[in-house]
Amino acid sequence: MAGVAKKINLTADERERLEALASSRTVAVAVHDRAKMLLLKASGRTNAEVADKMDVHPNTVTLLLRKFREGGVDAALADAPGRGRPAEITEADELWAVEKACVPPRDCGHAAELWYPALLTRHIRSVAEAEGHPRMATVSETRLRKILRDAKVQPWRVTYYCERRDEEFDAKAHDVLVVYRQLSLCFDEAGEVWAECVDAEGRAVHTVSVDEKPGIQAIAPTGEDRPPAAGGDAKGRPATVQRDHEYRRLGTWSLIAGIDLTEGVAHPLVRESHRSSDFVDFLKVLDAHYPRRDSIRLILDNHSVHTSAETQAYLNTVPGRFTFVFVPKHASWMNLIESFFGRMSRQMLRGIRVSTKEELRDRIYAWFEEFNEDPSPYRWTWGIDGIDMEDERPESIGYQVVNAKACRPEDMGKPAPPRPKRSPRKKTTVN
């Protein structure tokens, strides 16, 4: 019959416990209210009376009594297991996520080279359960970004470094720095040349930094460029040159160039190929430019065309004319011509468009002519202040024999620089 009170039975210990909880001011409110409701039911009150007394819905009292009948006082006082608030991400979870971000995607079965946030989030969610981090199975991309930001890790960015791959790096680098130190002494405080370098025989020495810049692309536009107009564009932004996205490739040129580190004059040679014969032709350009009685000292890298038999064969025809100073392997940054090429790329090659391949060659030569109208010497400053020239012999630095097998018979005993190692070719099999 509705409204009839159904009294619950409590042991003396249960009643004492509930009374203590009902009178306590330090327990949770939910536990306090449940203890009072159980005591009211134990006194013979109906569910409606208990609900009215505690100012709760009658269903709350019904649910409480069901939990009491199924599990006793402990079950009635405790919260039922449910979804609730998700577990917090622990420090162990964060360290695990950072460790995953430091593993390349290809090692995890993905095609991408670098992690980007969305891919990394999907991957972490997919493996979190299996690797013992279930909370990370629902991590958001925003939270993952914050974890990586706090760890100062950005796996979607690349910065470059230069690894030392030359066992004799220190010795070779020292030789190059000695040459740069000798050149620095030829300038006064105002940057003007007041002395010239001479060798042991009293001949003037011209130091030229040399390198190649292959693969300069000749690109033709498919539409006319629109020049900027004063007043900005329709949206009020500064006006720029407007160019059609499409273009045509016309081929490439290879540039061999050298810059005189004292005079600042640059010497170009543009060719379609990048072979020893082209490098020899460039040496002939330098030979024709400088007086015959002078010596030419080249600073260059270890490219195979610089130490080939064909190059040595030409050097045999001009004995004592050229001296090669090689920078350490994988250290082209020590060659000042690299800074010159950077300037050329920024000022002339970036965004260049031509109508023919020959036009690009002509414009390269024209740019060198403009540069040589007001030449500016490139000077090296890092690492040379601590070099005492009284203890050095610059005239002994460098090679006239670059290929021991192809040198003149009287030069066979002279040391030649080590040839650059070539990576072995991979063998392919045809089924």
Image (cartoon, helix red, strand yellow):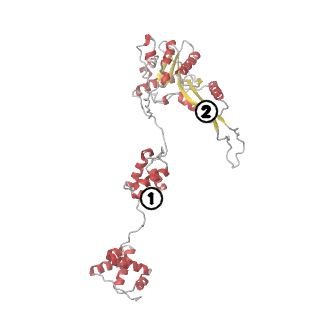
Look at label 2 and name its amino acid.
Answer: Leu
Residue 147 image position (x, y, % from top left):
44, 53
The residue singled out by tag 1 in the image is: 138
Residue 124 image position (x, y, % from top left):
43, 53
Q: Is residue 409 visible?
A: yes
Of residues 83 and 260, the one nearer the viewer is 83
Q: In the image, is 8 to the left or to the right of 359?
A: left
Look at label 1 and name its amino acid.
Answer: Thr
Q: Quadrant of residue 414?
A: top left
Q: Quadrant of residue 188?
A: top right
Residue 269 image position (x, y, % from top left):
59, 23
The residue singled out by tag 2 in the image is: 349
Q: In the image, is 267 to the left or to the right of 137?
A: right
Q: Residue furthest right?
A: 230
Of residues 8 and 248, the one nearer the viewer is 248
Residue at 58% in and 15% down: 288
Residue 46 image position (x, y, % from top left):
39, 86
Gap between marks 1 and 2 measured at Cα: 49 Å
Determine whether the residue tagged by mark 1 lies in a helix, strand or loop.
Answer: helix
Q: Are marks 1 and 2 in contact (CB under 8 Å)?
A: no
